[in-house]
Image (cartoon, helix red, strand yellow):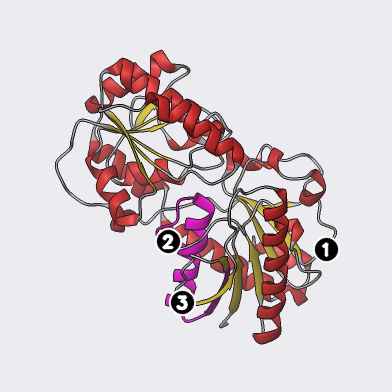
Amino acid sequence: MTLTVLNVAYPLAPVGPDAVGGAEQVLSMLDQALVRAGHRSIVVGCRGSSASGILVETPAAAGVLDEAAKGRAQRAHRAAIATARGQWPIDVIHLHGIDFDAYLPDDGPTLVTLHLPLGWYPAEALRPARDDLWLHAVSAAQHKTAPPDARLVAPIPNGVDIEALNLPQPRRDFALVLSRICPEKGIHLALDAAKQAGVPLVIGGKVYPYETHTRYFHDEVKSRLDGRRRFLGPLGFTAKRRFLNAARCLVVPSLAAETSSLVAMEALACGTPVVAFPNGALPDVVEHGKTGFLVNNVDEMAQAIVAASSLDAETCRTEARRRFSLERMISSYMDAYQALARLGTGQAHLAASL
């Protein structure tokens, strides 16, 4: 069954192969997979986005990303979704933004991927009344945090393109952080740990113009930078792959309950061990003492950064190939799309398929 799928991005973050955020990267991988499989892929994303299929572009927000800017972007997304539905026979709508309920269409088979901690979504958004609207988590760990009355189908775990990430090259003596730059990501803690360990640290990421994010960067990150601890800004896929394959370890100092951690999966695919706080799904991604270290404070993080070079790169790659298959993720989404497109056969059929 050939499908037309409308993927809708978060209104304030561009999507594409070089996107910074995990939700944006997953959307881009699905867009590419749909086109490769001969389906029609339509993407609603803000200016600066790219798509393998058809891009329906909305204006990029300018200036500070406050509530007014968010409201304008959401209205533009609602209009773009209506335009796409009027122009093409959409079989499935797939929403990825944390604010999906602000531009959720009133009808039509719809899938919502909950990329962020479930507690960050309005409680009522997790209890859709429609039979043609289904929500899912991106890991078993995230799914377990759902309130009892949430209507979630089975998780679809994230995956990464392991072969595309692999780039044989010599290791260099630096630790790496790849992340959005915001308070909950704990970048300042990685800087403190790397300094304590006496190991250079490279930070790749984007500072979005939210007031709290820019203040955090200037107050907590920029003040800790020096000749051995550098901030490079956003890294596209090619640069990200190069740094991941060269680093002694990836550091994930997130203070949030990570729902999956694509970047940790990407690091392991490159044979690079991961040092992380055991928040959210990270204990399911990192096997302590085998593919990385789970730590509880800055002192332990510093010790783990030093010890990371003792772990075996091929073991990391083997575990990534075994557990974080992109093909498995894509196949699960394709099954979900087909089931949603056949929604007329009944809710029970869809639940069984997912």
Q: Which residue corresponds to mark 3?
A: 35
Q: Is residue 213 left or right of residue 317?
A: right
Label 1 element class:
loop
The quarter of the image holding the C terminus is: bottom right
Classify mark 2: residues with Cα within 10 Å, few (<14), some (14-19) or many (20+). some
Q: What's the magenta region?
A: 17-44
Left or right: residue 254 versus residue 193 is right
- Say which label, 3 or 1, has the lower sequence index: 3
Q: Are marks 3 and 1 in contact (CB under 8 Å)?
A: no
Toward the right, the furthest residue is 129
Mark 3: amino acid: Val
* Residue wearing tag 1: 130
Percent from the top left, x then y, of residue 163? 29, 57
- Residue 336's place in the image compared with 317, above or below, is below
Residue type at numbered disc 1: Arg
Q: Quadrant of residue 280?
A: top right
Q: Residue at x 48, y 65 (%)?
A: 48
The reply to whether the C-beta atoms of the residues labelled 2 and 1 are less than 8 Å apart is: no
Mark carried by residue 327? 2
Q: Residue furthest front?
A: 63
Disc 2 to disc 1, C-alpha distance: 30 Å
Camera-side residue of 90 and 326? 90
In the depicted structure, whether residue 194 falls above or below residue 120 = above
Q: Nearer the viewer, residue 138 or 180?
A: 180
Type of amino acid under label 2: Glu
Circle 3 residues within 10 Å: few <14, some 14–19, many ≥20: some
Q: Position of residue 322 (x, y in %)?
A: 37, 48
Circle nearer the N terminus (3, 2): 3
- The answer to whether residue 224 is magenta is no
